[in-house]
Amino acid sequence: MARSGSESLAPWLAERLGVTLQAQRPVAGGDIHTAWCLELAGGGRLFAKINCSEALPLLEAEADGLAALAAAADPLRLTVPQPLALGLVAERAVLVLPWLDLGSGGCSAGGQGAAGWRSLGAALAGLHRRSLEQSCAPGDRADGCFGWPRDNVIGATPQINGWQADWGIFFARCRLAPQLERLARSSGALRRAGELLERLPDWLASHRPEACLVHGDLWSGNIGLCGDGPGTLFDPSVHRGDREVDLAMARLFGGVPESFFSGYEQVWPLPAGHQQRRPLYNLYHLLNHANLFGAGYLQQAQRQIETLLQQRP
């Protein structure tokens, strides 16, 4: 079977969606899955992620996350692509989503791009706030606890969830500890990692965030502007957590204009101390990248641990 599975994909799409696949081409954007533009008879397009059958749980977690975000989003202000079809096609896992016309607004901080990014930041603030008032998925709890009803993934790495009433304990046990344990098995324990985990709940004890639904993997590759319409979020790793984790990661690798953050602040300003918590929250993503991609991120994560321990009492 070809990587795209075109000979099997066409009848599957016809059965599931009643559409006729006319052509398909690979597109950029897939570190874990291959990504495809599906061109339909009549001129429409769809987006597909395809991988081996063992990757179906990753796509299922993505589909669940998209549905949860959509439940809390204002559809007039934020586009969250909803799964159209999901399943196994000739021993390949396939997720089909609407095609998003990304990029025409650009990542520019000026002109119409700035206005679009400001609106997108405001829409994320609205999503965070709205999620406090409702359950966003089966088994979700809108009672102030942190976590999610099922484990999911961050990239291709398992993301442990469950529920905790204390944010510091959740972040230590369910975010940093599993990543550090995974690294220790593959590359050896990072220096002073145990000390960091032991002290972390006390560091966050005076910070009392609300348990918002967060995207969880909000870097510039998972966010964008859609032509003349509202902005969009995709590829989530959702859970209920401190909303600051989304804003922190959006700054980690760059590419998200400052107007996005100003738009967020206009709707729901972040509390005092968020700049100091940002390196701690982003350590999770540095550890995950070290687990996924290796040495350079491993060294960066080690430096981050040392810096955090030097700065904290």
Image: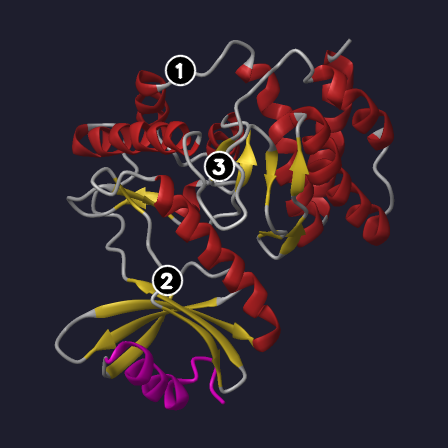
The coloring applied to the image is secondary structure
Circle 2: element type: loop
Q: Is residue 165 above or below residue 149?
A: above
> Which amino acid lies under the numbered mark 3 shown in the image of this protein?
Val
- Local packing at callout 1 (Cα closer than 10 Å; few below 14, some 14-19, many 20+) is few
Q: Which stretch appears magenta?
A: 1-18
In the displayed structure image, the side of residue 230 where residue 29 appears, left or right: right
Q: x, y percentage for residue 38?
A: 29, 74
- Local packing at callout 2 (Cα closer than 10 Å; few below 14, some 14-19, many 20+) is some
Q: Is residue 28 above or below residue 163?
A: below
Residue under pointer 1 = 269
In the displayed structure image, the side of residue 12 where residue 56 appears, left or right: right
Q: Is residue 305 above or below residue 173?
A: above
Instruction: Report the magenta stretch's main SS.
Output: helix
Q: Earlier in the sequence, mark 2 or mark 3?
A: 2
Q: Earlier in the sequence, mark 1 or mark 2?
A: 2
Residue under pointer 3 = 214
- Local packing at callout 3 (Cα closer than 10 Å; few below 14, some 14-19, many 20+) is many
Closer to the camera in the image, 26 or 58? 58
Q: Which mark is residue 174?
A: none
> Which amino acid lies under the numbered mark 1 shown in the image of this protein?
Pro
> Which amino acid lies under the numbered mark 2 shown in the image of this protein?
Pro
Q: Residue at x 45, y 16 (%)?
A: 270
Q: Is residue 276 above or below residue 107?
A: above
Q: Which mark is residue 83?
A: 2
